[in-house]
Structures are given as structure tokens and as C-alpha cells.
Image: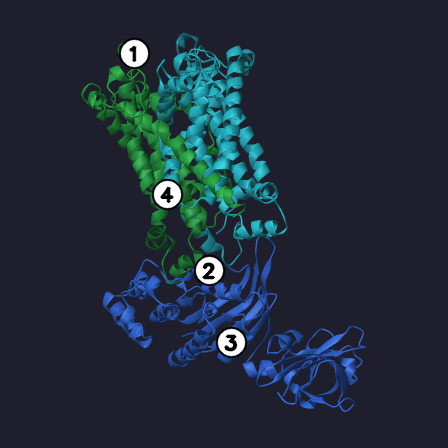
Amino acid sequence: MRGRPLPRGDPGYGVERREARLAWWLVSPALAAIVLVALFPLVWTVWESLHLHDLRMPWLGQPFIGLGNYLEAVGDERFRAAMGHTLFFAVVSVTLELALGTMLALAMNRAFRGRGLMRASVLVPWAMPTVVSGLLWKFMFDGDAGIANAALVKVGVLDQPLVWFIRTGFAWVPVILADVWKTTPFVALLLLAGLQNIDASLYEAARIDGASAWRQFRFVTLPLLRPAILVALIFRTLDAFRVFDLIYVMTGGGPGTSTEPIALYTFNSLLQYLRFGYGSALSVIVFVVTFALALVYIRYLGAGLTETKA
Amino acid sequence: MTGEPGRGRWATVAIVGLIAATAFPFYWAIVSSFTPESRLFSAPRLFPDTLVLDHYRALFTEREFWVPIRNSLVVAGTTTAFCVAVGALCAYALARLRFRGKAPLLALILAVSMFPQISVVSPLYLLLRALRLINTYPGLILPYLTFAMPLTVWLLVGIFRQLPAELEEAAMVDGASRLRTFLEVVIPLALPGLATTAILTFVYSWNEFLFALSFTLGPERQTVPVAIALLRGQYQVPWGQILAGSIIATAPVALLVLAFQRRIVQGLTAGAVKG
Amino acid sequence: MASVRLEGIRKTYPNGHVAARDLDLEIADGEFMVLVGPSGCGKSTALRIVAGLETPTGGRVLIGDRDVTGLPPQERDIAMVFQTYALYPHMTVRENLGFGLRMRGVAKATIVDRVVKVAEALALGQVLDRKPGQLSGGQRQRVALGRAMVREPQAFLFDEPLSNLDAKLRVETRAELARLHRRLAATIVYVTHDQEEAMTLGGRVAVLRDGKVEQVAPPMELYRRPATVFVGGFVGSPAMNFLPGDIMGRTDGSTLGIRPHDVVLVPPGQGDLDAKVDVVEPRGSELLVHLRLDGLGSERELRVVAPPEPMVPADTVTGVRFDRERLHWFDRQGRRVE
């Protein structure tokens, strides 16, 4: 209700102006920090992406090459592959996390004993550094007698231990498992909060109307859970697209470059190959893709995110 | 709730399954970190018979692991303190004061929180290099503001908005200026929320990897996640030490989080569900 | 104490909602003025504008003879009691009471002195070191009151302070407020949606509707001589009946208002009209009879308050006679005509 300021001749003008001035004083330190470390670098990245800037060959200077880097990226096989890997990783892990998360949330919504233990077991994987979770799972899948191989052989799924991280494609298994392990509980938490917001009397009304458990789920739970699901989707998809820590520490992008996501390829271009111009173009592409995704989701969710209330 | 009595059992099974599946990698990591090197890759036993402190000792005597711990504490701690303080001021203005540009500012903060870190690594690298801040504490704290600042502002705006506006109105009618109202009425009431925000910011900062990897050069300033990831052995991967380091890396944040579970869950989900 | 004046107050919100349109109100020094009206009528907005918590889009606010329109609440020297009391939960009662004085830099000794005096006057002496969370509803109400009293302001503003209390406490606190007004000769601006509360408390009552003042008058005058159809229907319970004027022979489109208490039931044919009894509500000391008047175009309802005996059976026909001295006539625009 108090969004727009009063016009000049207005009796309240003085008061509002003082308030606005105070507001800007309070806001400026945070704003300055954000502009300095986020906005300005982003603009710089875009600027860089339009130039040739190879730190290994400083004598070449930094000539303007327009969209040259971008064109190179489009034609770059490794880049296209990286996009594919990222997409694959995002789709698989987010789907698994949502499905498992929903089931878990449903279960957690009913069981009452051990709430605290549940919460704890949910929070600790979330709280740990991603690299640590990656290392834990790498350890479990490493070596002939690593626990994963040992268990799978014992149960009969495998005839003999696999070298997971050497075989293209198989390396994805521990990676995705690690991601799912770390974040499904968090997704479950988000969905649980959404579930708990659903009025219990709606289920009772549905039951009186003769709806089976499945129908209750389809017609009461699912529609009312939609906002929470979309929120979980946004967060997880954005995170999955930006994946870096996990893969760096588990496979380094390998075997070869078969698990390399775009964030890692960008990182390598920048800090390994020192091709700042090209790496910046890749950065911009990552940024644009992330943003486009976010916008698509936000459009779906509506504008509730920037609502203000005095 | 819905369904027949059989459902309850299914739910309990699911929960037990969840707790077991979540706990197992931990359990295994902890057990293995106490397992002597020679036994690490022989046939694994769920319940080991020998436990040793070798790996932990080696971490501190051979690898000076206290250095990355110190670095992480300094960086995460300073980032948190700075962001909560500065962020609280900004958040209060956004939550309660009237001024032009509020909506764009909120949108900007939301947008920045979605920046992929990789997209700002290169300019930050060049900027830090120009300022000679590579491999220093400020050289990490500054980049950390990229995600920590929007996070704290976002969380605190929600927290301040939830306080009853009438209290602040009463204070103003009583004669308190906006600033005094903020300090004497709002802050004391928002303390739990401030604490939660601080914990979340600390956890994110402690766990951060990409910037720490990119902007440090060596062990003197590396943080714990980087130190662990880069642990190299002479002949083979030093899994024992890596796991020991991982346990140490996780312990503080895990304890913090466990101590404040309920608040943290509230804080995390409130913003999400309401949004 | 001082007078409070609202001159030509207009308030339009950015979303287009008009909360106040050309509101004029004068509250004399030491007067107890109640603002009453249905929700959305602008009474709370008007109060908040006096307090400085909202700025008007046009018009002036004067406290005493000072134009305070451009001043924030801190500089207006008024005290306000909120609907939810708004006590500072983290401070003790003593600190709550002294907060305002501390903010204005009053000497510590004076603060202690005034706080103790007010606490005693309000029977809060025993709970000075407790926090609001440890108090009963009535005690919290008194702390809210005390916080205002300690300030010794130029005027007191009350925003529906009794709506959170149960009926018994409400009656007790009403008496408390009346006493307060007498003792302090305080200028009080009081907002409520409850017309009964308004009538019992107000020295003068302002009935608001759609952002304007419909009528300002002492309670009895509002009751006996409502200036508009709206005021007539708002004040008094059960509500006034409105009938087309041609019932009593006026063909100029005017409306007749007659209160349920001013209608008598008589045998059919012996009154001004006949009507059919629809529903009878026994209320102990009286009967509330709902009657149906057929054949008037749209079926009209007439409410009559009758003595508890004899019982009036439903679905019978009865006559009604209007007290000639209590007829209220309103023109086509709903304004009173004599």
C-alpha cells in the first residue's frame, strides 16, 4: 500500500523525504558490496567475452573480437558435450530428488516419533561441504574392495568389482548418488513444509466424499503442493546447472572429459588454459542459461517474490 | 491423516530407511577414518576390530591441518559478521521504510543470488590480482560477499517483516526515531532470526569451494574444503587422511546445525514456501 | 491537553483506494470524541493520520494550534493505545512505561517518579518488574494505558482498544476509560466499530462512512435526530426500520424511519398498517418481533420490540402503530427533513 512516494506539494513530503534519505543510508553499504563484487564483475565478464584475452600469450594484447568467442563456443565439441553432460546431470538428479523427496515428505508428514532424529539426519548432509560428500561417495566406490563394490558383488548384482571412475558412463553413478544423497533430504524438507500448510480438513472432506488414498494425493495433495514443488524445482535445477564442486572432486570431469559440466569446462578454460576471453564467453553463456531457467520458473510461480509491505 | 493403519507402517519403514541411507556414508567414513591404512582397502567389515588415530595425527603433524581450519574460521567468521551487520541495516530499510527503488533493489538482490559463481570468477580474479589480494583473507572475504550478502539480506527482510509493525509504530509514537526503534525494539526481537541467519551464512561460507580454490595459491590461505580436496599422497590417494579431514571439516557445521535444527529448518523453508 | 483538528483531510492510496475524502473534524480540548463506522469507513485511517503514522494526500492536521501535518509521530506529542496493545515484549512493565519519556530525554528521576505514580493509579505496582508475557489480558491493557498516561501528552488516541477483551473485561475497562477521561480532563480520540461502545463512551460521536463524516453529535442526538438514513440505521440496536414514505401518505419519494422501540403492536386493523408475524425472538426482557409487510412492491420487513407478554404467535396478522413523536423523515438523498 505504501509503494509510491508523495508528490512535491504534498503535506507529507518532508517526512517521506527524510525516511527515504535514511533508507538510502541504510541500504548503501550492502548495495555497494553487491555492486562491487557481483554486478561490476558480471559486466566485466561480458566485456571480456568480447575480447581475445589469453594470459599465456600476453603479447597478443586484448583485441576486440566481437562475438568471436561465442562463435567458437558454438562450434566447440567439448563445450557442446559439456552442455549435454550438464543437462543429463540436471535432469536425472532433479527428477530423482523430486520423486524421492516427495515420498519422503509424505512419509515424514505422518510419522510422529523421532521428529528430531529425522530433522538431524536431513540437515547434516545439507550442511556438509559438497566436496566432502563427493569424497565420501568416491571413497565408497573406489577400489576393488571399496564398500560399494563389496556389497554389490556380495548381493550378486555384479560378478566382479567395477572400476567405476575409469569406465565412461559408470562414473555418473556415484556422482549422481552423491548429489541425491546430499540434497534429497533438503528437497523433502521444502516439500514437507508445503505439505504441512495443507489444511487437514481438506483430506477429511475428501475421505467423506469417498476418495481413495491415491485420489486424495492426486486431487488434494498434488495441486496444493504445486508452489512448494516449483520452488524446489527452481532451486535444484539452478544448482544442478551450476554443479562444480562435486564433479571436480569426484572425477575431475573424467574419465577424459566425459563427466565435465559447463561450469568445470569454464573453470578449466579460465584458470587452467588461462583463456580469459573465451572462458568469459562461456561464463556468460552459463549465466544466460541459468537466468533463462530462473525466469521461466518465476513466470510460473508468479510475482510474489518482489512484493513489498511497509 | 489419510489411509488405513497399514500406511503408518509403510511410513515408518520409509523413515527408518531414510535415516539409515543418510547415516551410512557417514558411519562408513567415520569408521574408515579410524581404520589403519593397510586395512582400508582389504575386505571391508561393517564393524571394525581395530581403531587407530593415525590419520588424525598425521593430518596435524604432517599436514598442519590446523592452518586451513584457522583460515576457514577467519574467512567464514568475518564474512558472517560483516554480512549480518550490514545486511540487517539494508534489510530493515527494505522491510519497513518507504522509498523509491525498493522493488528494483529487491529484484537486484534476488537476481544476484542466482548468479552462477563461475560467471564472476574471472573478473574477480583479475580484480583481486590488481589489488594484490590473491591468496589473502580479504581476497576471499570480498568474493564471498557475492553470495553471502544477498543471502543475509533476503533472509533478514523476511524476518523483519514478520515482526508486528505495531510495535515499531508504538515506539515511534513514543518518540523513538527510526534508528532508535531499529536498535531498541526491532533488533532485540529479531535476535533469534539474526542468529539463524548468521548460522546459515556461516555454513555457506565454510562450505564454499570454487572461490577458495581459485583465489588461493597455497596451504597458508587455503580453506578446509580446498585443503581436503587437494590432499595428495606420495604413492596413492591418502584416503584415511582425506576422511579424517572430512570429518573434521563437517563437525563444526554439523554441530551448529544440529544445535539449532528447528530454527534452521524454519528459516530455510519459510523463505521458500512463502515465495 | 489540546484540541485536535482535521481540516479537509484526503487520503488516497497508490492502488486507488480512497480512505478519506474531505474529512473535517474538530475535537475540543478535553473532549472524548469517538469515531465510529463500518469497516472501511476510514476511521482508523483518520486516527493514524492524527498520529502521524500515515500522511494525508491533502488537508491539514492541527494539534493545539500547531500544524503538525508535516511532522512525524515522534514530534507530535500524542500518545496512542493500539488494538493489540503493542507492548515491548522484551522489556519489563517499568521499562515499557518509561520508554517514551526516555526517548524524549526526560530526567531519570522524573521518569521514575511518573512511572511509579501511574503504576499505582492503574494497580500495576506489583508487576512493574514483570514482562508483558507474564501478565493477564486486563493487566496488559492497563500497561498500554499507563504507557500513554506517563507521557502526559496533548491528546490520547485509542485504536479499538477493547476489541481483544472478553465481554466482562470490556465493560470494566469502559468504566476505567470514562474515569480516566474525567480525572485527567484528557482530549481523547477513540476509534471503534461497535456503536454501543461509541454511544456509552463518547461525549460526542462522529459517524464515518466512505471516508467522510456523516454526522457529529452527542450520542443522544445521534439517536434521536440522525442526520441521514445511514446514521439512523447505524446507531441503535435493533436497527431502525426504513419504509417508503407513501405508507404514511407522503408521495415525494421520502423515506420513513422508525425504531423498533417506537412501534406498538395492536389488534389488526386498529393501527397504521397490518403485517404478518414472521419470526419472534424472545429476549427475556422483551420480544423482538420480525414482521412482513406484503404488497409493497418488494416484501418489507419490520422489526418491533414488544413487551415480553403477551406472546405473539408466528404466522398471525397483527396491526402496528407508529409513535407519532418518533417518526424520522428522510428525503430522496437520505438526508433528514423535519
Residue C56 visible at all: yes
Chain B's colour is green
Chain C's colour is blue
Q: Nearer the viewer, mark 1 or mark 2?
A: 1
Q: Nearer the viewer, mark 3 or mark 4?
A: 4
In the rendered image, which residue does mark 4 sit on? Answer: A116
Tag of residue B156: none
Chain A's colour is cyan
Circles 1, 2 touching at the beta carbon (< 8 Å): no
Tag of residue C197: 3
Instruction: Residue type at mark 3: give it.
Output: Glu
Residue reaching furthest to the left: B61
| Front residue of C310 and B92 | C310
The reply to the same-chain question for discs 1 and 2 is no
| Front residue of A57 and C125 | C125
The reply to the same-chain question for discs 1 and 3 is no
